[in-house]
Amino acid sequence: MTSPRTAGTAPRSALTRARVLESAVDLADREGLGALTMRSLARELGIEAMSLYHHVANKEDLLDGVVDVVAVEIQDAVARLEPLADDAPRSAWRTATRRQILTARAVLLRHRWASTVLETRKTFSLPVIRYYDSLIGLMRHGGFSYDLVHHAMHALGSRALGFSQELFEPDGATAGSAGGGATEGADDAATAMLMQMAEQVPHMVEMLAAVSHEDGAGSTLGWCDDQSEFEFGLDIILDGLDRLAEREQH
Amino acid sequence: MTSPRTAGTAPRSALTRARVLESAVDLADREGLGALTMRSLARELGIEAMSLYHHVANKEDLLDGVVDVVAVEIQDAVARLEPLADDAPRSAWRTATRRQILTARAVLLRHRWASTVLETRKTFSLPVIRYYDSLIGLMRHGGFSYDLVHHAMHALGSRALGFSQELFEPDGATAGSAGGGATEGADDAATAMLMQMAEQVPHMVEMLAAVSHEDGAGSTLGWCDDQSEFEFGLDIILDGLDRLAEREQH
DNA sequence: GACGTAAGCCTTACGACGTAAGGTAGGACC
DNA sequence: GGTCCTACCTTACGTCGTAAGGCTTACGTC
Protein backbone atom coordinates (compact mmCIF):
# COMPACT_ATOMS: atom_id res chain seq x y z
CA MET A 1 0.00 0.00 0.00
CA THR A 2 3.00 2.30 0.18
CA SER A 3 3.12 4.71 -2.72
CA PRO A 4 4.93 2.95 -5.56
CA ARG A 5 7.59 5.56 -6.05
CA THR A 6 9.59 3.83 -8.74
CA ALA A 7 13.30 4.33 -8.98
CA GLY A 8 13.63 7.01 -11.60
CA THR A 9 10.79 9.30 -10.68
CA ALA A 10 11.87 12.42 -8.88
CA PRO A 11 9.19 13.94 -6.67
CA ARG A 12 8.56 17.61 -6.96
CA SER A 13 10.23 18.21 -3.65
CA ALA A 14 12.27 16.25 -1.17
CA LEU A 15 9.60 16.61 1.49
CA THR A 16 8.69 13.20 2.79
CA ARG A 17 7.00 11.77 5.85
CA ALA A 18 10.40 10.99 7.26
CA ARG A 19 11.59 14.56 6.87
CA VAL A 20 8.41 15.88 8.41
CA LEU A 21 8.87 13.65 11.43
CA GLU A 22 12.53 14.53 11.84
CA SER A 23 11.68 18.17 11.71
CA ALA A 24 8.99 17.66 14.31
CA VAL A 25 11.49 15.99 16.63
CA ASP A 26 13.93 18.84 16.15
CA LEU A 27 11.28 21.40 16.85
CA ALA A 28 10.16 19.65 20.03
CA ASP A 29 13.77 19.32 21.15
CA ARG A 30 14.43 22.99 20.68
CA GLU A 31 11.20 24.62 21.79
CA GLY A 32 9.27 22.03 23.71
CA LEU A 33 6.23 19.94 23.04
CA GLY A 34 3.89 22.88 23.34
CA ALA A 35 5.57 24.56 20.40
CA LEU A 36 4.94 21.58 18.17
CA THR A 37 1.82 22.65 16.29
CA MET A 38 0.87 21.95 12.73
CA ARG A 39 1.36 25.58 11.87
CA SER A 40 4.75 26.01 13.50
CA LEU A 41 5.99 22.75 12.06
CA ALA A 42 4.92 23.87 8.60
CA ARG A 43 6.67 27.20 9.09
CA GLU A 44 9.77 25.26 10.05
CA LEU A 45 9.58 23.37 6.78
CA GLY A 46 8.75 26.39 4.70
CA ILE A 47 5.30 25.19 3.71
CA GLU A 48 1.73 25.81 4.78
CA ALA A 49 0.07 23.93 7.59
CA MET A 50 -2.40 22.10 5.42
CA SER A 51 0.35 20.69 3.27
CA LEU A 52 1.45 18.55 6.16
CA TYR A 53 -1.70 16.52 5.72
CA HIS A 54 -0.22 14.98 2.62
CA HIS A 55 2.37 13.28 4.77
CA VAL A 56 0.56 12.63 8.01
CA ALA A 57 -3.11 11.84 8.49
CA ASN A 58 -3.60 14.25 11.39
CA LYS A 59 -1.84 15.41 14.50
CA GLU A 60 -2.24 12.13 16.34
CA ASP A 61 -0.59 10.40 13.43
CA LEU A 62 2.20 12.96 13.55
CA LEU A 63 2.78 12.18 17.21
CA ASP A 64 2.66 8.47 16.50
CA GLY A 65 5.33 8.99 13.90
CA VAL A 66 7.42 11.11 16.21
CA VAL A 67 7.36 8.35 18.79
CA ASP A 68 8.53 5.97 16.11
CA VAL A 69 11.51 8.18 15.35
CA VAL A 70 12.54 8.21 18.99
CA ALA A 71 11.92 4.49 19.36
CA VAL A 72 14.13 3.78 16.37
CA GLU A 73 16.82 5.95 17.91
CA ILE A 74 16.53 3.83 21.03
CA GLN A 75 16.69 0.66 19.03
CA ASP A 76 19.82 1.83 17.26
CA ALA A 77 21.50 2.66 20.53
CA VAL A 78 20.54 -0.70 22.00
CA ALA A 79 21.76 -2.49 18.90
CA ARG A 80 25.21 -1.01 19.41
CA LEU A 81 25.48 -2.73 22.78
CA GLU A 82 27.43 -5.92 23.03
CA PRO A 83 24.91 -8.74 22.66
CA LEU A 84 24.38 -11.29 25.37
CA ALA A 85 26.29 -14.47 24.52
CA ASP A 86 24.24 -17.64 24.36
CA ASP A 87 26.49 -19.36 26.87
CA ALA A 88 26.47 -16.47 29.34
CA PRO A 89 25.36 -17.49 32.82
CA ARG A 90 21.74 -17.08 33.81
CA SER A 91 22.55 -14.15 36.02
CA ALA A 92 23.84 -12.18 33.05
CA TRP A 93 20.26 -11.22 32.20
CA ARG A 94 20.31 -8.68 34.98
CA THR A 95 23.27 -6.59 33.91
CA ALA A 96 22.24 -6.82 30.28
CA THR A 97 18.71 -5.67 31.08
CA ARG A 98 20.01 -2.90 33.26
CA ARG A 99 22.31 -1.73 30.49
CA GLN A 100 19.59 -1.80 27.88
CA ILE A 101 17.19 0.21 30.00
CA LEU A 102 19.80 2.78 30.88
CA THR A 103 20.68 3.06 27.21
CA ALA A 104 17.05 3.74 26.37
CA ARG A 105 16.98 6.27 29.15
CA ALA A 106 19.94 8.12 27.72
CA VAL A 107 18.03 8.60 24.48
CA LEU A 108 14.91 9.77 26.25
CA LEU A 109 16.95 12.29 28.17
CA ARG A 110 17.86 13.84 24.85
CA HIS A 111 14.15 14.14 24.06
CA ARG A 112 12.58 15.00 27.37
CA TRP A 113 9.19 15.59 25.84
CA ALA A 114 9.09 12.09 24.44
CA SER A 115 7.89 10.36 27.58
CA THR A 116 4.82 12.57 27.65
CA VAL A 117 3.99 11.67 24.08
CA LEU A 118 4.74 8.03 24.69
CA GLU A 119 2.25 7.94 27.52
CA THR A 120 -0.55 9.37 25.44
CA ARG A 121 -0.28 6.92 22.56
CA LYS A 122 -3.19 4.55 22.38
CA THR A 123 -1.56 2.14 20.01
CA PHE A 124 1.90 0.66 20.03
CA SER A 125 4.37 1.26 17.32
CA LEU A 126 6.41 -1.59 15.98
CA PRO A 127 9.74 -0.10 17.11
CA VAL A 128 8.51 0.10 20.68
CA ILE A 129 7.23 -3.44 20.60
CA ARG A 130 10.55 -4.57 19.24
CA TYR A 131 12.29 -2.89 22.10
CA TYR A 132 10.10 -4.77 24.52
CA ASP A 133 10.70 -7.94 22.62
CA SER A 134 14.42 -7.69 23.22
CA LEU A 135 13.79 -7.13 26.91
CA ILE A 136 11.68 -10.25 26.99
CA GLY A 137 14.50 -12.11 25.30
CA LEU A 138 16.92 -11.07 28.01
CA MET A 139 14.58 -12.24 30.73
CA ARG A 140 14.05 -15.53 29.01
CA HIS A 141 17.81 -15.93 29.11
CA GLY A 142 17.50 -15.34 32.81
CA GLY A 143 15.22 -18.34 33.08
CA PHE A 144 11.99 -16.40 33.49
CA SER A 145 8.76 -18.18 32.70
CA TYR A 146 6.58 -16.26 30.31
CA ASP A 147 4.25 -15.65 33.15
CA LEU A 148 6.99 -14.05 35.19
CA VAL A 149 8.12 -12.01 32.20
CA HIS A 150 4.64 -10.69 31.88
CA HIS A 151 4.47 -9.65 35.51
CA ALA A 152 7.94 -8.15 35.19
CA MET A 153 6.84 -5.92 32.34
CA HIS A 154 4.00 -4.58 34.39
CA ALA A 155 6.25 -4.12 37.39
CA LEU A 156 8.73 -2.11 35.38
CA GLY A 157 6.07 -0.08 33.68
CA SER A 158 7.53 2.97 32.04
CA ARG A 159 10.83 2.22 33.71
CA ALA A 160 11.38 -0.39 31.06
CA LEU A 161 11.78 2.43 28.58
CA GLY A 162 13.94 4.49 30.86
CA PHE A 163 11.69 6.95 32.59
CA SER A 164 9.53 7.08 35.67
CA GLN A 165 7.07 9.77 36.40
CA GLU A 166 8.41 11.60 39.36
CA LEU A 167 5.57 13.28 41.14
CA PHE A 168 8.28 14.80 43.22
CA GLU A 169 10.40 16.89 40.94
CA PRO A 170 9.77 20.61 40.94
CA ASP A 171 12.00 21.11 37.96
CA GLY A 172 9.93 23.70 36.16
CA ALA A 173 11.52 22.80 32.84
CA THR A 174 8.71 24.38 30.91
CA ALA A 175 8.67 24.54 27.18
CA GLY A 176 9.31 27.70 25.28
CA SER A 177 12.42 29.30 26.66
CA ALA A 178 15.12 28.60 24.14
CA GLY A 179 18.00 29.43 26.44
CA GLY A 180 18.42 27.02 29.35
CA GLY A 181 17.46 29.32 32.16
CA ALA A 182 17.90 28.54 35.84
CA THR A 183 14.85 28.15 38.04
CA GLU A 184 16.19 28.89 41.47
CA GLY A 185 13.27 31.08 42.41
CA ALA A 186 10.83 28.19 42.22
CA ASP A 187 12.96 26.06 44.51
CA ASP A 188 13.26 28.77 47.08
CA ALA A 189 9.56 29.43 46.97
CA ALA A 190 8.78 25.75 47.42
CA THR A 191 11.21 25.45 50.29
CA ALA A 192 9.76 28.51 51.97
CA MET A 193 6.27 27.10 51.57
CA LEU A 194 7.34 23.86 53.17
CA MET A 195 8.88 25.62 56.11
CA GLN A 196 5.70 27.56 56.60
CA MET A 197 3.72 24.41 57.13
CA ALA A 198 6.27 22.59 59.19
CA GLU A 199 3.80 21.37 61.75
CA GLN A 200 1.45 20.09 59.11
CA VAL A 201 4.07 17.91 57.45
CA PRO A 202 6.70 17.30 60.10
CA HIS A 203 8.25 14.21 58.54
CA MET A 204 8.62 15.85 55.16
CA VAL A 205 10.39 18.86 56.57
CA GLU A 206 12.68 16.73 58.66
CA MET A 207 13.52 14.53 55.73
CA LEU A 208 14.37 17.49 53.55
CA ALA A 209 16.56 18.91 56.28
CA ALA A 210 18.31 15.60 56.86
CA VAL A 211 18.90 14.72 53.24
CA SER A 212 19.98 18.11 52.02
CA HIS A 213 22.51 18.35 54.81
CA GLU A 214 24.42 15.29 53.73
CA ASP A 215 24.51 16.35 50.19
CA GLY A 216 27.03 19.10 49.69
CA ALA A 217 24.97 20.88 47.05
CA GLY A 218 22.13 23.29 47.68
CA SER A 219 19.74 23.06 50.58
CA THR A 220 16.75 23.41 48.29
CA LEU A 221 14.32 20.94 46.88
CA GLY A 222 16.17 20.58 43.64
CA TRP A 223 19.03 18.52 44.91
CA CYS A 224 17.90 15.10 43.73
CA ASP A 225 20.15 13.28 41.34
CA ASP A 226 17.59 11.91 38.93
CA GLN A 227 19.92 9.42 37.35
CA SER A 228 21.01 7.71 40.54
CA GLU A 229 17.47 7.75 41.90
CA PHE A 230 16.31 6.08 38.73
CA GLU A 231 18.96 3.43 39.06
CA PHE A 232 18.10 2.89 42.70
CA GLY A 233 14.50 2.13 41.85
CA LEU A 234 15.46 0.05 38.86
CA ASP A 235 17.88 -2.06 40.90
CA ILE A 236 15.28 -2.79 43.53
CA ILE A 237 12.94 -4.15 40.89
CA LEU A 238 15.61 -6.09 39.04
CA ASP A 239 16.80 -7.65 42.29
CA GLY A 240 13.27 -8.65 43.18
CA LEU A 241 12.71 -10.16 39.76
CA ASP A 242 15.98 -12.05 39.87
CA ARG A 243 15.01 -13.57 43.20
CA LEU A 244 11.70 -14.69 41.76
CA ALA A 245 13.38 -16.16 38.70
CA GLU A 246 15.79 -18.05 40.91
CA ARG A 247 12.90 -19.47 42.87
CA GLU A 248 11.23 -20.60 39.65
CA GLN A 249 14.29 -22.69 38.82
CA HIS A 250 13.57 -24.81 41.92
CA MET B 1 -5.45 37.75 51.28
CA THR B 2 -8.61 35.68 51.22
CA SER B 3 -11.77 37.71 50.99
CA PRO B 4 -12.92 38.57 54.52
CA ARG B 5 -16.40 37.18 54.17
CA THR B 6 -17.78 37.98 57.59
CA ALA B 7 -20.36 35.77 59.24
CA GLY B 8 -23.61 37.47 58.44
CA THR B 9 -23.05 38.57 54.86
CA ALA B 10 -24.81 36.37 52.35
CA PRO B 11 -23.15 36.24 48.93
CA ARG B 12 -25.31 36.92 45.93
CA SER B 13 -25.15 33.29 44.93
CA ALA B 14 -23.95 30.05 46.40
CA LEU B 15 -21.27 29.68 43.75
CA THR B 16 -17.91 29.30 45.42
CA ARG B 17 -14.51 28.04 44.44
CA ALA B 18 -15.32 24.80 46.19
CA ARG B 19 -18.49 24.32 44.19
CA VAL B 20 -16.70 25.10 40.96
CA LEU B 21 -14.05 22.51 41.72
CA GLU B 22 -16.55 19.86 42.71
CA SER B 23 -18.44 20.46 39.53
CA ALA B 24 -15.24 20.16 37.55
CA VAL B 25 -14.48 16.81 39.16
CA ASP B 26 -17.98 15.60 38.38
CA LEU B 27 -17.71 16.69 34.79
CA ALA B 28 -14.36 14.98 34.32
CA ASP B 29 -15.71 11.82 35.95
CA ARG B 30 -18.68 11.74 33.63
CA GLU B 31 -17.26 12.89 30.31
CA GLY B 32 -13.51 12.65 30.58
CA LEU B 33 -10.72 15.13 30.93
CA GLY B 34 -11.06 16.36 27.38
CA ALA B 35 -14.58 17.53 28.10
CA LEU B 36 -13.42 19.67 30.98
CA THR B 37 -13.20 23.09 29.34
CA MET B 38 -13.97 26.47 30.81
CA ARG B 39 -16.98 26.76 28.57
CA SER B 40 -18.45 23.35 29.30
CA LEU B 41 -17.83 23.72 33.01
CA ALA B 42 -19.61 27.06 32.98
CA ARG B 43 -22.51 25.53 31.09
CA GLU B 44 -22.64 22.84 33.76
CA LEU B 45 -22.95 25.50 36.43
CA GLY B 46 -25.43 27.60 34.50
CA ILE B 47 -23.12 30.58 34.11
CA GLU B 48 -20.90 32.03 31.43
CA ALA B 49 -17.32 30.93 30.93
CA MET B 50 -15.78 34.21 31.96
CA SER B 51 -17.58 34.13 35.29
CA LEU B 52 -15.41 31.22 36.33
CA TYR B 53 -12.49 33.59 36.49
CA HIS B 54 -13.91 35.08 39.65
CA HIS B 55 -13.28 31.79 41.41
CA VAL B 56 -10.19 30.43 39.70
CA ALA B 57 -7.29 32.41 38.31
CA ASN B 58 -7.11 30.46 35.06
CA LYS B 59 -7.34 26.93 33.80
CA GLU B 60 -4.09 25.81 35.40
CA ASP B 61 -5.42 27.03 38.71
CA LEU B 62 -8.61 25.12 38.09
CA LEU B 63 -6.65 21.95 37.52
CA ASP B 64 -4.56 22.60 40.61
CA GLY B 65 -7.76 22.90 42.57
CA VAL B 66 -9.21 19.78 41.07
CA VAL B 67 -6.13 17.86 42.13
CA ASP B 68 -6.63 19.21 45.62
CA VAL B 69 -10.17 17.88 45.69
CA VAL B 70 -9.00 14.41 44.74
CA ALA B 71 -6.09 14.55 47.16
CA VAL B 72 -8.43 15.47 49.98
CA GLU B 73 -10.63 12.55 49.02
CA ILE B 74 -7.57 10.33 49.28
CA GLN B 75 -6.62 11.81 52.61
CA ASP B 76 -10.10 11.17 53.95
CA ALA B 77 -9.99 7.56 52.84
CA VAL B 78 -6.56 7.09 54.37
CA ALA B 79 -7.66 8.72 57.59
CA ARG B 80 -10.39 6.11 57.95
CA LEU B 81 -7.79 3.35 58.07
CA GLU B 82 -6.79 1.94 61.39
CA PRO B 83 -3.68 3.85 62.47
CA LEU B 84 -0.40 2.14 63.11
CA ALA B 85 0.07 1.61 66.83
CA ASP B 86 3.22 3.06 68.30
CA ASP B 87 4.23 -0.27 69.73
CA ALA B 88 3.65 -2.17 66.52
CA PRO B 89 6.68 -4.14 65.36
CA ARG B 90 9.06 -2.60 62.86
CA SER B 91 7.79 -4.84 60.12
CA ALA B 92 4.31 -3.41 60.44
CA TRP B 93 5.39 -0.50 58.27
CA ARG B 94 5.11 -2.70 55.24
CA THR B 95 1.50 -3.78 55.51
CA ALA B 96 0.46 -0.31 56.63
CA THR B 97 2.20 1.30 53.67
CA ARG B 98 0.74 -1.24 51.31
CA ARG B 99 -2.72 -0.59 52.65
CA GLN B 100 -2.37 3.16 52.40
CA ILE B 101 -1.18 3.03 48.82
CA LEU B 102 -3.93 0.66 47.77
CA THR B 103 -6.44 2.93 49.46
CA ALA B 104 -5.16 5.88 47.47
CA ARG B 105 -5.36 3.75 44.38
CA ALA B 106 -8.99 2.95 45.00
CA VAL B 107 -9.77 6.65 44.98
CA LEU B 108 -7.79 7.26 41.82
CA LEU B 109 -9.66 4.46 40.12
CA ARG B 110 -12.82 6.43 40.72
CA HIS B 111 -11.23 9.40 38.95
CA ARG B 112 -9.20 7.84 36.19
CA TRP B 113 -8.33 11.16 34.64
CA ALA B 114 -6.72 12.35 37.86
CA SER B 115 -3.36 10.70 37.34
CA THR B 116 -2.92 12.58 34.09
CA VAL B 117 -3.64 15.89 35.78
CA LEU B 118 -1.43 14.99 38.72
CA GLU B 119 1.49 14.38 36.43
CA THR B 120 1.19 17.74 34.77
CA ARG B 121 1.16 19.84 37.95
CA LYS B 122 4.27 21.87 38.37
CA THR B 123 3.68 22.67 42.00
CA PHE B 124 2.58 20.47 44.84
CA SER B 125 -0.60 20.97 46.69
CA LEU B 126 -0.65 20.73 50.44
CA PRO B 127 -3.01 17.73 50.48
CA VAL B 128 -0.64 15.76 48.28
CA ILE B 129 2.34 16.67 50.43
CA ARG B 130 0.42 15.61 53.50
CA TYR B 131 -0.27 12.28 51.91
CA TYR B 132 3.44 11.84 51.29
CA ASP B 133 4.16 12.95 54.81
CA SER B 134 2.10 10.13 56.23
CA LEU B 135 3.95 7.67 54.01
CA ILE B 136 7.23 8.99 55.32
CA GLY B 137 5.91 8.52 58.84
CA LEU B 138 5.17 4.87 58.16
CA MET B 139 8.64 4.29 56.81
CA ARG B 140 10.19 5.99 59.77
CA HIS B 141 8.29 3.51 61.92
CA GLY B 142 9.96 0.86 59.81
CA GLY B 143 13.32 2.13 60.90
CA PHE B 144 14.19 3.87 57.61
CA SER B 145 16.84 6.55 57.72
CA TYR B 146 15.69 9.75 56.08
CA ASP B 147 18.10 9.04 53.32
CA LEU B 148 16.47 5.71 52.65
CA VAL B 149 13.04 7.26 52.84
CA HIS B 150 14.08 9.72 50.21
CA HIS B 151 15.31 7.01 47.89
CA ALA B 152 12.16 5.04 48.58
CA MET B 153 9.98 7.91 47.45
CA HIS B 154 11.81 8.11 44.19
CA ALA B 155 11.68 4.36 43.75
CA LEU B 156 7.95 4.31 44.26
CA GLY B 157 7.37 7.31 42.05
CA SER B 158 3.75 7.60 41.07
CA ARG B 159 3.11 4.20 42.61
CA ALA B 160 3.14 5.93 45.96
CA LEU B 161 -0.13 7.53 44.99
CA GLY B 162 -1.58 4.38 43.56
CA PHE B 163 -0.96 4.45 39.86
CA SER B 164 1.73 3.45 37.46
CA GLN B 165 1.81 4.40 33.85
CA GLU B 166 1.34 1.24 31.93
CA LEU B 167 2.85 1.66 28.53
CA PHE B 168 1.32 -1.70 27.91
CA GLU B 169 -2.37 -1.33 28.25
CA PRO B 170 -4.35 -1.00 25.05
CA ASP B 171 -7.48 -0.17 26.95
CA GLY B 172 -8.77 2.53 24.66
CA ALA B 173 -10.82 4.07 27.44
CA THR B 174 -11.14 7.30 25.58
CA ALA B 175 -13.12 10.19 26.92
CA GLY B 176 -16.47 11.15 25.56
CA SER B 177 -18.58 8.04 25.47
CA ALA B 178 -20.84 8.26 28.47
CA GLY B 179 -21.91 4.64 28.42
CA GLY B 180 -19.19 2.14 29.26
CA GLY B 181 -18.77 0.56 25.88
CA ALA B 182 -16.68 -2.48 25.14
CA THR B 183 -13.56 -2.17 23.02
CA GLU B 184 -13.13 -5.65 21.69
CA GLY B 185 -12.40 -4.50 18.19
CA ALA B 186 -9.23 -2.74 19.23
CA ASP B 187 -7.95 -5.83 21.01
CA ASP B 188 -8.58 -8.03 18.05
CA ALA B 189 -6.87 -5.59 15.75
CA ALA B 190 -3.86 -5.39 18.00
CA THR B 191 -3.67 -9.16 18.30
CA ALA B 192 -3.92 -9.54 14.57
CA MET B 193 -1.18 -7.01 14.06
CA LEU B 194 1.07 -8.85 16.46
CA MET B 195 0.50 -12.15 14.69
CA GLN B 196 1.37 -10.51 11.44
CA MET B 197 4.81 -9.61 12.67
CA ALA B 198 5.48 -12.80 14.52
CA GLU B 199 8.99 -13.16 13.19
CA GLN B 200 9.88 -9.61 14.08
CA VAL B 201 8.91 -9.97 17.72
CA PRO B 202 9.04 -13.68 18.44
CA HIS B 203 9.32 -13.45 22.20
CA MET B 204 6.41 -11.10 22.47
CA VAL B 205 4.15 -13.35 20.45
CA GLU B 206 5.18 -16.38 22.41
CA MET B 207 4.64 -14.65 25.68
CA LEU B 208 1.18 -13.54 24.70
CA ALA B 209 0.34 -17.05 23.60
CA ALA B 210 1.71 -18.59 26.78
CA VAL B 211 0.14 -16.21 29.23
CA SER B 212 -3.27 -16.00 27.65
CA HIS B 213 -3.50 -19.77 27.63
CA GLU B 214 -3.16 -20.14 31.36
CA ASP B 215 -5.65 -17.49 32.04
CA GLY B 216 -9.14 -18.76 31.43
CA ALA B 217 -10.40 -15.44 30.15
CA GLY B 218 -10.00 -14.05 26.67
CA SER B 219 -7.06 -14.80 24.45
CA THR B 220 -6.65 -11.18 23.51
CA LEU B 221 -4.33 -8.49 24.71
CA GLY B 222 -6.80 -7.15 27.19
CA TRP B 223 -6.49 -9.92 29.69
CA CYS B 224 -4.26 -8.20 32.22
CA ASP B 225 -5.61 -7.77 35.70
CA ASP B 226 -4.45 -4.25 36.45
CA GLN B 227 -5.02 -4.50 40.15
CA SER B 228 -2.97 -7.62 40.73
CA GLU B 229 -0.23 -6.42 38.41
CA PHE B 230 -0.06 -3.20 40.37
CA GLU B 231 0.21 -5.13 43.61
CA PHE B 232 2.89 -7.37 42.14
CA GLY B 233 5.08 -4.41 41.27
CA LEU B 234 4.33 -2.71 44.55
CA ASP B 235 5.27 -5.78 46.55
CA ILE B 236 8.58 -6.14 44.78
CA ILE B 237 9.49 -2.60 45.70
CA LEU B 238 8.25 -2.86 49.28
CA ASP B 239 10.16 -6.09 49.76
CA GLY B 240 13.32 -4.51 48.44
CA LEU B 241 12.90 -1.51 50.68
CA ASP B 242 12.24 -3.66 53.71
CA ARG B 243 15.42 -5.59 53.08
CA LEU B 244 17.38 -2.36 52.87
CA ALA B 245 15.81 -1.04 56.05
CA GLU B 246 16.68 -4.25 57.82
CA ARG B 247 20.26 -3.91 56.70
CA GLU B 248 20.36 -0.37 58.00
CA GLN B 249 19.45 -1.65 61.47
CA HIS B 250 22.78 -3.56 61.48
C1' DG C 1 4.22 16.97 -28.92
C1' DA C 2 -0.93 16.90 -26.63
C1' DC C 3 -3.54 15.34 -22.94
C1' DG C 4 -5.53 13.18 -18.83
C1' DT C 5 -4.23 12.13 -14.15
C1' DA C 6 -2.69 12.64 -9.83
C1' DA C 7 0.28 14.25 -6.43
C1' DG C 8 2.04 18.25 -3.77
C1' DC C 9 1.04 22.50 -2.12
C1' DC C 10 -1.98 26.56 -1.16
C1' DT C 11 -6.23 29.40 0.19
C1' DT C 12 -10.12 30.04 2.73
C1' DA C 13 -12.96 29.02 6.35
C1' DC C 14 -15.12 26.84 10.59
C1' DG C 15 -15.70 25.68 15.23
C1' DA C 16 -13.34 24.66 19.15
C1' DC C 17 -10.21 26.57 22.86
C1' DG C 18 -8.27 30.00 26.80
C1' DT C 19 -8.75 34.56 28.20
C1' DA C 20 -8.12 40.05 27.88
C1' DA C 21 -11.05 44.13 28.36
C1' DG C 22 -14.80 46.30 29.68
C1' DG C 23 -19.81 46.59 30.85
C1' DT C 24 -23.86 45.96 34.20
C1' DA C 25 -26.55 45.15 38.20
C1' DG C 26 -27.47 44.46 42.97
C1' DG C 27 -26.27 44.24 47.84
C1' DA C 28 -23.36 46.50 51.73
C1' DC C 29 -21.99 50.42 54.00
C1' DC C 30 -21.54 55.38 54.95
C1' DG D 1 -28.91 58.38 48.59
C1' DG D 2 -24.51 58.10 47.05
C1' DT D 3 -20.59 55.10 46.69
C1' DC D 4 -18.22 50.95 46.15
C1' DC D 5 -17.43 46.15 45.68
C1' DT D 6 -18.38 41.94 43.61
C1' DA D 7 -20.56 38.52 40.91
C1' DC D 8 -21.81 37.95 36.57
C1' DC D 9 -22.17 39.00 31.48
C1' DT D 10 -20.85 40.57 26.56
C1' DT D 11 -17.76 41.04 23.07
C1' DA D 12 -13.66 40.11 20.91
C1' DC D 13 -8.85 38.34 19.90
C1' DG D 14 -5.48 35.00 18.77
C1' DT D 15 -4.53 30.25 18.97
C1' DC D 16 -5.44 25.55 17.70
C1' DG D 17 -6.72 21.30 14.43
C1' DT D 18 -8.63 20.45 10.11
C1' DA D 19 -12.63 20.18 6.28
C1' DA D 20 -13.27 21.59 1.45
C1' DG D 21 -11.72 22.80 -2.63
C1' DG D 22 -8.46 25.21 -6.11
C1' DC D 23 -4.06 25.67 -8.54
C1' DT D 24 0.27 23.87 -10.55
C1' DT D 25 3.63 20.86 -11.72
C1' DA D 26 5.46 16.33 -13.40
C1' DC D 27 4.32 12.08 -15.09
C1' DG D 28 2.48 8.11 -18.28
C1' DT D 29 0.26 7.34 -22.39
C1' DC D 30 -0.97 8.29 -26.95
Image (cartoon, coloured by chain):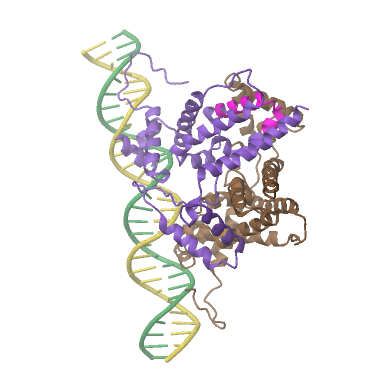
Chain colours: A purple, B brown, C yellow, D green
Q: Answer whether residue B172 is visible to the viewer in this image.
A: no
Instruction: Give the residues in magenta.
Output: A130-150
How many marks the image carries: the answer is: 0
Q: Residue at x 64, y 38 (%)?
A: A237
Residue at the front extreme, as displayed: B250
The answer to which image quadrant residue A146 occupies is top right
Q: Is residue B43 above or below residue A52?
A: below
The answer to which image quadrant residue B19 occupies is bottom right
Q: Residue at x 77, y 61 (%)?
A: B87
Q: Is residue A143 magenta?
A: yes
Q: Is residue A86 above or below residue A184?
A: above
Q: Main secondary structure of the magenta part?
A: helix
Which is more toward the observer, B131 or B76? B131
Q: Residue at x 59, y 26 (%)?
A: A133
Q: Position of residue A230 (x, y in %)?
A: 55, 42
Image quadrant holding the C terminus of chain A, namely top right
Q: Residue at x 66, y 43 (%)?
A: B237
Q: Position of residue A184 (x, y in %)?
A: 41, 56
Q: Is residue A14 above or below residue B172?
A: above
Q: Position of residue B97 (x, y in %)?
A: 70, 52
Q: Answer whether residue A23 is visible to the viewer in this image.
A: yes
Q: Is residue A214 magenta?
A: no
Which is more toward the observer, A49 or B83? B83
Q: Is residue B3 left or right of residue B232?
A: left
Which is more toward the observer, A237 or A136? A237
Q: Position of residue A163 (x, y in %)?
A: 53, 40
Q: Is residue B168 left or right of residue B122?
A: right
Which is more toward the observer, A39 or A205? A205
